Image (cartoon, coloured by chain):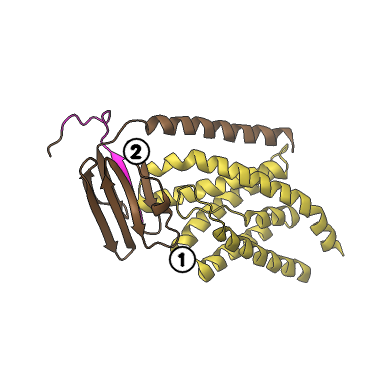
Chain colours: A brown, B yellow
Amino acid sequence: MKRKDIILIAVFLCVALAGLIAVRLIQSTGGALVKVTVDGKLYGTYDLYTDRTVEIKDELGYNKIVIKDGYADVTDADCPDRICVDHARIHNDHESIICLPHKLVVEISGGSDSGIDAKTQ
Amino acid sequence: MTKKITMSALMVALAMILSYIEVLIPFSFGIPGIKLGLANLVVVTALYLFGARQAFTISIVRIVLVAFTFGSLAALFYSLAGGMLSFLVMMLLRKVKGFSIMGVSVAGGVSHNIGQLIAAMLVVENLNLVLYAPVLLIAGVITGLLIGIAAKLILPSVKKAMRD
């Protein structure tokens, strides 16, 4: 292990640490909306505080999203690794659950600092 | 010449096995589809043993074969993104004075993950994925270190075996 190697590793770790802090800050405020995107296209936007179940079944696969008690969670899916199902439930702004094989992104948005100061129910 | 071909074929096979077993290890950082990159061990070793062109061939052949045997078109895309970026970075860094196989391997590990992350971001067309970058950076450093240590250990033996 040479000197430059150690510097490189240190730089990577420092950037990673800074990134972790940034991510924590970005994801620190509560959210208001659950935005579901499939293959880059908006599938639906739902109120985070209205309990609801969204089931998506298309040619990419099946995912079940449950919005309950101000949290969004993926509770079932037929993708091979089910990482999306294992993922903890989310409720902070900019948090997301992703099912890559199904090109599904469930993200929280519309938190109090995102510029939305009123929305119609 | 035949020895080189045989060794390369062996390395592709080894890389395929490494690709396979990393699927068995339940290693998810909550980022679906993103693999550890254990096959990099073979690429790094080939890079220092045979040079860039040979190592590149081994890498590409492995990626394509793995994707077609137990992967999908999507898996091919992520694998190519990670593998190609990783190879490019390692090939270039190796030429820079002052870096040993450890640094090259770490850079390879990190760029492998970043390449896959970029591919994933393109597929789901979502910038939010970038929030996973810090975790992937750390994972890349760790796997890069482990692979670097392993490569450093086996390189002398392989070199010797090639000579006989």
| Magenta residues, start to end | A103-118
Residue B57 on image: x %, y %: 63, 62
The kind of secondary structure element at disc 1 is: loop
At label 2, counting other C-alpha atoms closer than 10 Å, the crowd grade (few under 14, some 14-19, many 20 or more) is many
B51, A28: nearer the viewer: A28
Tell us which disc is closer to us: 1 or 2.
2
Marks 1/2: CA–CA distance: 30 Å
The question of residue B148 being in magenta is answered with no
Inspect the image, locate mark 2, and give the three-letter code of the amino acid beneath it: His
Q: At 73% across and 52% down in the image, what residue appears?
A: B48
Q: Mark 1 and mark 2, same subunit?
A: no
Q: At 63% across and 36% down in the image, what residue appears?
A: A9
Q: Main secondary structure of the magenta part?
A: loop
Q: Is residue B60 visible?
A: no
The reply, left or right, for residue B66 in relation to residue A26 is: right
Q: Which residue is mark 2?
A: A94
Compared with residue B27, is residue B73 higher up or lower down, i.e. above or below? below
Q: Which residue is mark 1?
A: B72
Instruction: Kindly identify which chain the residue marked by label 1 belongs to.
Output: B
Residue B24 on image: x %, y %: 56, 60
The reply, left or right, for residue B45 in relation to residue A61 is: right
Quadrant in the picture for the C terminus of chain B = bottom right
Compared with residue A9, is residue B125 higher up or lower down, i.e. above or below? below
Quadrant in the picture for the N terminus of chain B = bottom right
